[in-house]
Image: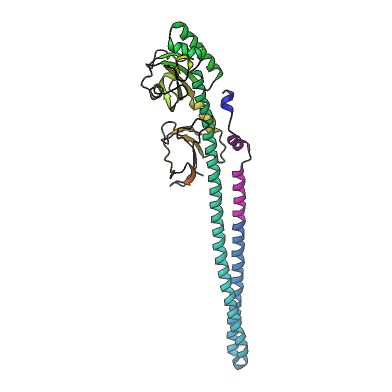
Amino acid sequence: MVAATDRTSPRAAALATTPDSGEQDTDIAALIARLTAEVNQVACEKTRSIQNITNQMKMLALNALIESSRAGVQGAGFAVVAQEVRAVGQQVETIARELETQLTRRTANLMQSITQMTERSRGERMVDLALNAIELIDRNLYERTCDVRWWATDSAVVDCAEAANAANVALVAERLAVILRAYTVYLDLWLCDLDGNIIASGRGRQFDVTGANVANTTWFRDAKKLRSGDDYVAGDVERQPLLGDAQVATYCASVRQGGNAHGRPLGVLAIHFDWQTQARAIVEGVRVDDDKARVLLVDSNFRVIAASDGQGLLTERVPLTLNGRRAGFYNDRTGAQIAFHATPGYETYKGLGWYGVIMQTG
């Protein structure tokens, strides 16, 4: 990978290098939950001990009443004391039961609050990680839009688009090959005429595409409609049959007379970003603290275009519940926690409505 694709935004770099605060928060919450449970257990044990003592007091009072009744008049005063002891024991038992009930309820509420706090902390961290993944992609793809607009003004590219003779084709093929040797994130670069015929490519020995027609592809049709050389087309991630069915993200710019942004259109330059390799490196590099968690990139139709587990690529759709939000987290019907963040864009690249997604089942 070239140096350009290794650069990351300050936020992404910070998330990648700082200590795992999510794990620290989880540890603290777990400690508080454990201590709360221990307090609850101690309180319950002590109130039960009090209840046992009051039961003994009531039994002693009952025995005293029985004995005082046998003593007749002489035992009348003792009977009054026994009744008072019995009443005190009953009051203590009532207080103990109320104490146990209140402590149990309050510690249960505290533990529930801790659980909610832990889930929220984990959810917010997952949202940050989802943003991290999509930000890295945005930065990467912004650079692709710069590449295609720059290379479309290359004199060899312009000359070949204007006059596709053997000498110009050979020269531009060599020029594209030189670019590919420096920019290893691309599978191939194609120069097409306005009819969609591929005039030249950078990897002619590996991919025999010269002469093939791509006029029916969406990216080529959109590229023909570009108004100037400052504009570009960012195609959806797709499999490209002419490149061994590889997953690519195709970026296009119009080649114009004289390399001038507003010159007469001469052709289309298409660059095929090696999507699967680069995207996999990003989603697999996101640090999550659960082996079962999936880190995903999904397109505007919620189609999986990258997955840390390599599953569902270009076939699976994730039914995100956005509720009008660009970022957030929630638990789905299965109990899995889902975090998402929409593409924020980077400089002049506004993004394609993609999302970074993390699904955590544990």
Task: Establish if 112 lies above or below 336.
Answer: below
Of residues 359 and 262, which is closer to you in this image?
262
Q: Which of the 4 image quadrants contains residue 59? A: bottom right
Of residues 52 and 160, which is closer to you in this image?
160
Colour pattern: rainbow
Q: Residue at x 58, y 85 (%)?
A: 65
The secondary structure that dominates the magenta segment is: helix
Q: Which of the 4 image quadrants contains residue 319? A: top left
The spot of residue 288 in percent (x, y) is 56, 39
**Residue that protrudes farthest toward the left in the picture:** 216
Q: Residue at x 54, y 48 (%)?
A: 120
Query: What is the total number of numbered labels drawn onto the structure image?
Result: 0
Of residues 51 and 64, which is closer to you in this image?
51
Q: Residue at x 47, y 14 (%)?
A: 258
Q: Is residue 25 shown in magenta?
A: yes
The spot of residue 219 in percent (x, y) is 41, 24
**Residue that protrudes farthest toward the front in the picture:** 262
Q: Is residue 362 shown in magenta?
A: no
Query: Is there any visible trace of residue 153 in the rendered image?
Result: yes
The spot of residue 67 in percent (x, y) is 60, 86
Span shown in magenta: 8-34
Quadrant for the N terminus, please.
top right
Task: Establish if 132 lies above or below 185.
Answer: below
Q: Residue at x 41, y 32 (%)?
A: 315
Query: Is there any visible trace of residue 204 in the rendered image?
Result: no
The spot of residue 166 in percent (x, y) is 44, 6
Specify whether 45 is left or right of 312. right
Task: Establish if 271 lies above or below 330.
Answer: above
